[in-house]
Image (cartoon, rainbow, N blue to C red):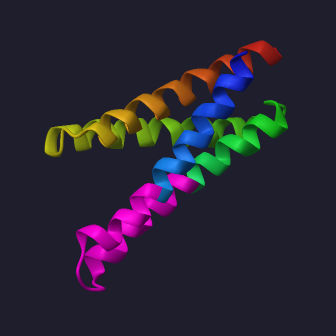
Amino acid sequence: MMRTTHKIITGLMIALGLIHILFTFHDYDTFSMWALWFASAGVAIILAGFLNIVLLRDVGKDKVVWLLCVLANIIFTVMFSAVLFLMPQPQVFIGVALFAMATIFALLLSRKQN
C-alpha cells in the first residue's frame, strides 16, 4: 500500500512539473530569461519525480540513491514552503504536500529495508 501511494505521489509530482512548464506559455508573452527560469523550475520538479521513480525501482537498496532522493524531496519541500510566503496559491500547497509525503515515504522505505 505504501509503495502504491508513493507511486501515485510521484506521478502527481511529475504532472505538477509538466503543468508548471505549460504555464510558462500562459504567464510569459515573450521568450526571456525569466520565462526560461520559470520553465526550468518545472523541469527540476519533473527530475525530482524521476528520482523518486529510481528509488521505487531500486527498492531502497542503494544508499546513495536513497540519500539523493531524500535530499531532493526535502529541498523541494523547503523551497515550496518558502514560496508559500510569496504566493499562497493552491499549486504551491500541493507542491509542499507532495514533496513532504514523498520524503516521509522515502524515509519509511529505508526503515522497511533494514
At x 82%, y 31%, the residue is 59
Image: magenta residue range: 19-46
Camera-nearest residue between 5 and 76: 5
Main SS, magenta residues: helix
- Tell whether 103 sits left or right of 114: left
Question: Is 43 in the magenta?
Answer: yes
Q: Is residue 26 above or below residue 100?
A: below
Q: Quadrant of the C terminus?
A: top right
Residue drawn at the location 44% of the way across and 56% of the way down: 19
Residue depicted at x 36% and y 37% = 78
Q: Residue furthest bottom?
A: 31
Q: Position of residue 91 (x, y in %)?
A: 33, 42
> x, y percentage for residue 9?
58, 33
Question: Can residue 46 be seen at all in this image of the molecule?
Answer: yes
**Is residue 62 in view from this perspective?**
no
Query: Would you place residue 25 above or below residue 31 in this image?
Result: above
Give the x, y percent position of residue 106. Answer: 64, 27
Res 79 → quadrant: top left
